[in-house]
Amino acid sequence: MISVILPVYISEPWTVILTEFAIKMLRACTNVPFQLIISEVGGEQLKSLADMHLRTEGLGQFYRDVNQAIDRAGADFIVVTGNDIIVQPGWLEALIKPFNVLPDCGLTSLAAVEGTGAAIGPHRPMELIVET
């Protein structure tokens, strides 16, 4: 089972629209089933979009909120994303592929192109394996 954790704080009305779009893209751009866990600070505006919804209190507790969601997930794979991350088709397939190819794989990430922190040019698949 795969759990996708989405920690969210709705501070402005447009944040709801952005988050709803990000969730629609998460679901539309993969054929891999997953459980969506939304950890929402101070509200329940997104409860109907979650497979599991956790309401948390207090800003500045991002890691606590993520850890709480991980504890509740009970999944083989956990993905943590943000409400400002808009995925592309095949995003989840790309994240789990290294676990099928590399028996000692412990972590994967959809990193920005060349570590710049931003996407550049037309999107192109890039395979990069970094050993630590």
Image: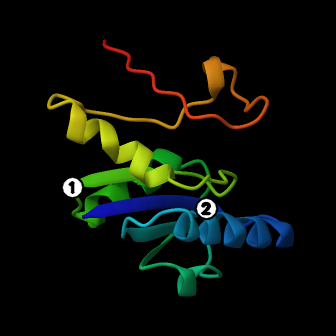
Packing grade of label 1 (10 A; few <14, some 14-19, many >=20) is: few
Q: Which residue is mark 2?
A: 8
Q: Which residue is mark 1?
A: 76
Farthest bottom residue in view:
48
Instruction: Say which element carries label 2.
Output: strand
Q: Residue at x 42, y 79 (%)?
A: 51
Along the horizontal axis of the image, is 22 left or right of 3? Answer: right
Q: Three-letter amino acid code at disc 1? A: Asp
Q: Residue at x 57, y 70 (%)?
A: 28
Q: Three-letter amino acid code at disc 2? A: Val
Farthest left residue in view:
103
Along the horizontal axis of the image, is 120 left or right of 40? Answer: right
Quadrant location of the N terminus in the rendered image: bottom left
List x then y, in percent, for residue 45: 65, 81
Per the rendering, the mark at residue 129 is none
Q: Residue at x 32, y 56 (%)?
A: 70
* Near-viewer residue (37 or 96): 96
Q: CA distance from mark 1 to mark 2?
A: 23 Å
List x then y, in percent, for residue 96: 33, 46
Along the horizontal axis of the image, is 35 left or right of 6? Answer: left
Above or below 34: residue 120: above
* Near-viewer residue (63 or 59): 63
Is the C-beta separation of discs 1 and 2 under 8 Å? no
Quadrant location of the C terminus in the rendered image: top left
Residue 9, picture quadrant? bottom right
List x then y, in percent, for residue 127: 46, 26
Instruction: Say which element carries label 1.
Output: loop
Q: Earlier in the sequence, mark 1 or mark 2?
A: 2
Above or below 96: residue 121: above
Task: Nearest to the eye among marks 1 and 2: give it.
Answer: 1
Along the horizontal axis of the image, is 25 left or right of 14? Answer: left
Above or below 6: residue 51: below
